[in-house]
Image (cartoon, grey):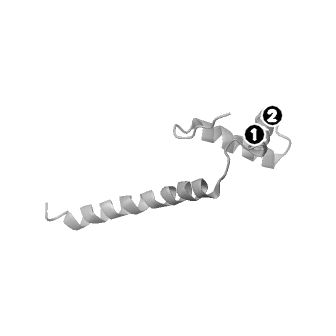
Amino acid sequence: MSKVRIEAMMWGAGTALGELPPYFMARASRLSGYDPNDEDDLKEFEELQRKRNNPESMVCLYIVITFLRMEECPWFHYSR
């Protein structure tokens, strides 16, 4: 047990530090007063859904491909 004590402590410290950025991002979002039901975001989402079937340029195609990859992630959920 004493052979891995330092490694285990470093692993625990790294895990704890890795949890800080998402916490501060969520806290900043909450404190900013951002409304997730904002109409601009809904319009952008609907436009992206429309471009999904008919990409107009390479940039739009890249955005659509990125969006499709995000849909495959089990932790990414969007709400309408």
Q: Quadrant of the N terminus?
A: bottom left
Residue at image point 78% right, 36% down: 46
Q: CA distance from mark 1 to mark 2?
A: 12 Å
4 displayed left or right of 23? left
Rendering coords of residue 28 (x, y %): 58, 59
Q: Quadrant of the C terminus?
A: top right
- The answer to whether residue 37 is above or below residue 9 is above
Residue at image point 13% right, 65% down: 2
Mark 1, Cα crowd under 10 Å, few <14 / some 14-19 / many 20+, is some
Q: Nearer the viewer, residue 79 or 67?
A: 79
Q: Nearer the viewer, residue 20 or 35?
A: 35
Label 2 sits on residue: 50
The quarter of the picture where residue 44 lies is top right
Rendering coords of residue 19 (x, y %): 43, 57
Label 1 sits on residue: 42
Kind of residue indicated by mark 1:
Leu
Kind of residue indicated by mark 2:
Arg
Rendering coords of residue 34 (x, y %): 66, 52
The quarter of the picture where residue 10 lies is bottom left
Which numbered disc covers residue 69?
Answer: none
Q: Residue extending furthest bottom?
A: 6
